[in-house]
Amino acid sequence: MKRVLPAVVLLVLLAGGCGTDKPDASPAPAPASPASESASESPSPSESPSTTKAAPQPRFADLTQGSTTSVVKLHAYDAKSASAVVEPIIFMTGDAYCRTFKIKRSDSRCVSQEYVTEASHTKVTVPIAATAKYFTWEGADGNVCIDAPEKGGTCPMTAKEFAGWFKLNEDGMVAIATTDGTLTRMAIVYTP
């Protein structure tokens, strides 16, 4: 028994420590749940770690730099200070979510949920441009103003009207656009 253990350790060191590939520069995947961690630690004999491909993980928009679009939960909105506290989220139709993240078609998120959301649990304070545009999904005449749910409403509204909506809908979902890390568009997302 004493001879087997050093041989196994030597084999593990040789097999695991001689890689020649460059390190993966992509962001680290989101932490797995404890149940999936134990399953991933010991692949079945028919699977090898190099051939098992994990499903894609959600990536949330970095709202602090560059130009991007995202759906967020709006936690705070201060027009006087021209800032908002937002939490990037994933907001997709159930079908698109399951296709994107390679979830079995029989999963309830694919068949019984019109929209799927996933929170990033990260709050970010973002400045609001003086020229920011605001939109709602509900027109003054009662018409629905939506091109795509994940882009929010398309009926223009004023900053004052948006502030009034926020007072009644704290943590509401808003589709935003940023330019150089500054909010330039905020559109209320319709949630049935």
Image (cartoon, grey):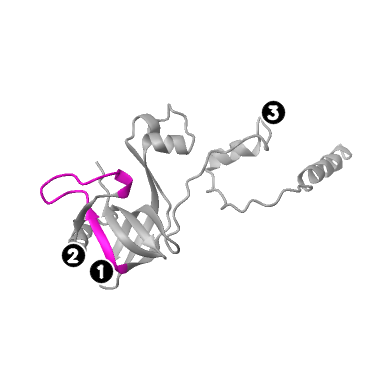
Q: Which residues are magenta?
A: 129-151
Circle 2 packing at 10 Å, graded few (<14), some (14-19), many (20+), is few
> Considering the numbered disc 1 on the image, is that residue within a helix, a strand or a loop?
loop
Tell me, yes or no, whether the two marked residues, 2 and 3, touch with CB atoms within 8 Å. no
Query: Farthest residue in the left direction?
Result: 141
Q: With 86 as the anchor, is 30 left or right in this view? A: right
Was residue 138 drawn as part of the magenta stretch in this picture?
yes
Quarter containing the C terminus: top left
Q: CA distance from mark 2 to mark 3?
A: 62 Å
Residue hosting label 3: 45
Quarter containing the N terminus: top right
Q: CA distance from mark 1 to mark 3?
A: 59 Å
Q: Where is residue 121 shown, x and y percent of the image?
A: 42, 54
Residue hosting label 2: 160
Of the two numbered discs 1 and 3 in the rendering, the one whose residue sits closer to the viewer = 1
Tell me, yes or no, whether the two marked residues, 1 and 2, touch with CB atoms within 8 Å. yes
User: Which amino acid type is shown beneath numbered disc 2?
Assistant: Lys
Residue at the (45%, 58%) spot, across then down: 62
Q: Where is residue 89 shown, x and y percent of the image?
A: 39, 50
From the viewer's side, name the closer residue of 38 and 89. 89
Residue hosting label 1: 79
Q: CA distance from mark 1 to mark 2?
A: 8 Å
User: Which amino acid type is shown beneath numbered disc 1?
Assistant: Ala
Residue at the (32%, 62%) spot, across then down: 184
